[in-house]
Image (tube, helix red, strand yellow):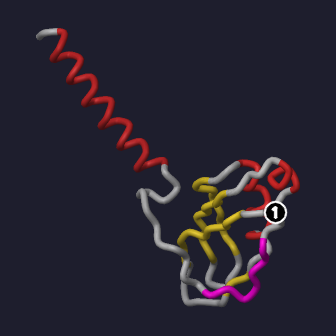
């Protein structure tokens, strides 16, 4: 076996391994997830952090949420966003209350931060 074919097989194996790991370890189990359609009873707007204001940091924080049938937040995992903004988004999200439903709901919620 030539060095070239060994490199090609190694690269293909590495790509397959990384792809499988991402699919297993990614909090959604897939790359995309629909926006959460569950209606909110109480929606709190995040406070724009002072550090973000002083340094002109803007952006979006995307969070995957699971909501229990009673409307309480069961789980929230940050999918992306500037770390300076994440804390404010999570603080606000913990105060949200959702309408009751027959089963758990899941999806993404986005918080847009601009001065």
Q: Residue at x 79, y 61 (%)?
A: 88
In this picture, is 94 found above or below 56? below
Residue at the spot of label 1: 48
Place of residue 70 in the rendered image (x, y in percent of width and height, measured from the top left): 67, 85
Q: Residue at x 83, y 66 (%)?
A: 47
Q: Residue at x 54, y 82 (%)?
A: 37
Q: Residue at x 52, y 55 (%)?
A: 27
If the image is split into quadrants, where does the N terminus sit? top left
Is disc 1 surrounded by few (<14), some (14 to 19) or many (20+) residues within 10 Å?
some
Place of residue 46 in the rendered image (x, y in percent of width and height, measured from the top left): 79, 68
Q: Among all residues in the image, which is located at the extreme right?
A: 50
In this picture, is 90 found above or below 42? above
Looking at this view, is 61 or 50 the one in front?
50
Examine the image and state in which quarter residue 114 appears.
bottom right
Identify the element where label 1 is drawn.
Answer: loop
Looking at this view, is 86 or 22 the one in front?
86
Examine the image and state in which quarter residue 76 appears.
bottom right
Place of residue 71 in the rendered image (x, y in percent of width and height, measured from the top left): 68, 83
If the image is split into quadrants, where does the C terminus sit? bottom right
Any magenta on residue 41? Answer: yes
What is the total number of numbered labels drawn onto the structure image? 1
Q: Among all residues in the image, which is located at the extreme left?
A: 1
In this picture, is 3 found above or below 85? above
- Would you say 87 lies left or right of 50 here? left
Place of residue 98 in the rendered image (x, y in percent of width and height, measured from the top left): 68, 84
- Would you say 38 lies left or right of 33 here? right
Q: Which range is magenta?
A: 39-45
């Amino acid at each position: 076996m030539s060095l070239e074919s060994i490199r090609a097989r190694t690269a293909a194996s590495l790509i397959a391994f990384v792809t499988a790991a991402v699919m297993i370890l990614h909090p959604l189990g897939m790359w995309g997830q629909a926006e959460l359609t569950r209606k909110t009873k109480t929606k709190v707007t995040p406070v724009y952090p002072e550090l973000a204001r002083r340094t002109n940091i803007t952006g979006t924080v995307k969070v995957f949420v699971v909501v229990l049938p009673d409307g309480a937040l069961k789980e929230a995992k940050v999918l992306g966003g500037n770390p300076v903004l994440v804390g404010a988004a999570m603080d606000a999200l913990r105060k949200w209350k959702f309408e009751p439903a027959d089963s758990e709901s899941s999806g993404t919620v986005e918080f847009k931060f601009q001065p």
